[in-house]
Amino acid sequence: MEKHEKVRQNLINAARKIFVRFGFEKTTMNEIALEARKGKSSLYYYFASKEEVFQAVVEYEAGIIVEKLKTAVNNSETLIDKARNFILVRFAEIQKLGNLYNALRDDFLNHLEFIKKARVQYDMMELNFIKALLNDGKQQRIFDINDIDTIAETFQMTLKAVELPLLIDYESEVFETRLNSLVDIFFYGILTRNDE
């Protein structure tokens, strides 16, 4: 990694800690520079404003979650395991990556144009993951789906609807049980079949 890129990454890592600690509004460029053990002028060499630093942080964290999701899905054998691991990793990473989560959910940040863009990009990335899973299931004749787009959007809305309640209990033993139940209900339903 080139020296300038190392310094920039060090500043992003420092900013991640400070933004999580104080939030976007209360964080100052001075606090970020102090955390990075750099002068404020060094910070301004790489970033013109606090908004620009936050944008770099959000983009970096989004990159982390995309890579972890790809790994989780690619390392799963069955489609249901892919879906289950997608959801487990999604919630685990969102819980860890506080800046990304706050950027995607905080109405206070609505005035920042890059936040709107980040939300759209993240939602599209997530929707494409879900569509790919459903399409694979349809191709393999595991899922009987006519409208993949609608089902994928419904699945994504379901994930967003349960996000807050699940993340509140993230450290509890019931977290994974609840996520597994969500996957089971979504893919298997709650009806029983009588083949008699």
Image (spheres, rainbow, N blue to C red):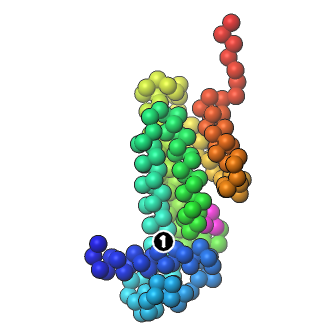
Q: Amino acid at mark 1?
A: Val
Q: In the picture provided, is 89 more to the left or to the right than 48?
A: right
- Across and down, in percent, residue 14 comes to 49, 78
Residue 75 in magenta? Answer: no
* Magenta stretch in the rendered image: 102-106
Q: In the picture provided, is 129 more to the left or to the right than 181?
A: left
Residue at point 63%, 51% (across, down) = 160
Residue at point 46%, 92% (across, down) = 40
Dot 1 falls on a residue whose secondary structure is helix
**Mark 1 lies on residue:** 57
Image quadrant in which you'd find residue 170: bottom right
Dominant SS type (magenta): helix
Residue at point 63%, 79% (across, down) = 22
Q: Is residue 44 visible?
A: no
User: In front: 93, or 54?
Assistant: 93
User: In front: 153, or 21?
Assistant: 21
Q: Is residue 125 above or below residue 13?
A: above
